[in-house]
Amino acid sequence: PGGHTAETVISAIQKAQGKFGGELSNLRATKDTKSPAAFVITTSQVNKSLVKNVLTTAFADANISEPQVDEVVNNAIRTAFADELEIQQNLQPEIALQEKISEELIDSYPELADFLGGIKIICKIERAATPEEINARLADLRFKPDMQNLNWSYDYEILGPDLNEMEPNQPVNSFAYISVEPEAGFRELSEEEWTRFVENETTKVLAAARLEGSLPRVRQFDPSVGAEAKTRALIAVILSLFAIVTYIWIRFGNVRYGIAAIVALVHDVCITLGAITACTYIAATPIGERLLIGDFKINLAIIAALLTIIGYSLNDTIVVFDRIRENRRKDRLNPQIINNSINQT
């Protein structure tokens, strides 16, 4: 935007983002080195639609490019564990040759007789891959949602650039993809049919070679989302504890009962978490193996167990308090009454 500084750009974005209920956190604006009148906006917000809408609203007359997400976490992990991770990567393919399989070619390679009238595509790849991997990519591609409009009824085969068979596990930097339209061996395809067939097979080859795998267990979260979730969780815990204290206070007529229940609750949960933490240190030891102790993680099962303990702790505490009230009646509370009440429950 002409006539703007980095500060005014950020200010305009911050005003516009309020209309969309989202925030462009960690916002920065820097001058574009290639175009002094343009700015490069960076943010940790990964919602591209939100970013585009905010920028369009803030600068209605500006030319705004499509937002790009830099997968920092994925890229960092791939770099750190490059030799240990097996991730499907873009082979960076290039079509070197497209040729119709004619009778003259069949005379030189009789084994291709079943592909008469088909197509031969020579594809070069910058990242070496084995024929087995290339075939696996083509098989995987068939089930991709955006590839359902392609025709998958054509027979195909992966060969070497010289049209000879290759070793399945030998990495190569080029290969030949041969395919045939079922009716091509019986009649001459029209120009439209041939063009459609060639485009169909070329799309398959390029898309299969460009397939990229992701790290399925890596998730990138906007810091503002994490901070908001943390704040809401803290508020929920505080309100829950307040509600428990209030309920027990009203039921037993003394705030000390409510505070005592919370102390017992925190004690039970902390002891359990301490035991889980201790298990991580002894799980791999001979004693841990004999006792069948595992290296427990905080997952849904553990959370369910903690919630069960919280429920039992509160229920047990309230039952004990109720028995203390019955045993006490009008007498002064003393250790004997408390001990008797606990033993009776």
Image: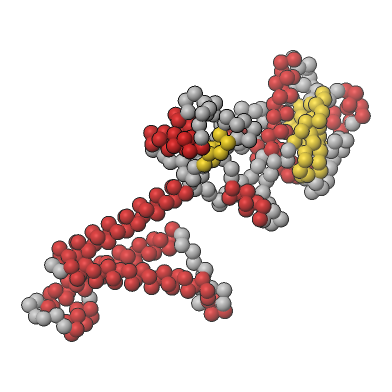
Q: Where is residue 121 in the image (x, y as percent from the top left)?
A: 79, 30
State whether residue 306 is above or below residue 335: above
Residue 308, located in which quarter of the rendered image? bottom left
Q: Nearer the viewer, residue 114 or 135?
A: 135
User: In which quadrant of the rendered view does residue 317 lie?
Assistant: bottom left
Does residue 5 appear left or right of residue 271 in this picture? right
Q: Can residue 198 be seen in this view?
A: yes
Q: Residue 178, can we see it?
A: no
Give the colour scheme shown: secondary structure
Q: Residue 32 appears at what percent x and percent y? A: 60, 35
Left or right? Give the position of 159 relative to 324.
Answer: right
At 42% from the left edge and 51% from the top edge, which residue is drawn? 227
Relative height, residue 322 to residue 208 (above, below): below
| Quarter assignment of residue 42 | top right
**Up-down relation of residue 26 to residue 108 (above or below):** below
**Front residue of 214 and 130:** 214
Which sits in the foreground, 62 or 341? 62
Q: So how many labels did they put on this image?
A: 0
Residue 251 lies, in percent from the top left, at 15, 64
Residue lying furthest right in this view? 108
Q: Quadrant for the C terminus, please.
A: bottom left
Task: Report the residue at 56% width, 77% height from top.
Answer: 285
The x, y position of residue 223, in whole percent, is 47, 49
- Left or right of residue 69: residue 234: left
Question: On the rendered structure, is 282 left or right of 162?
Answer: left
Residue in the image at 79% along x and 36% along y: 124
Residue situated furthest bottom in the rendering:
336
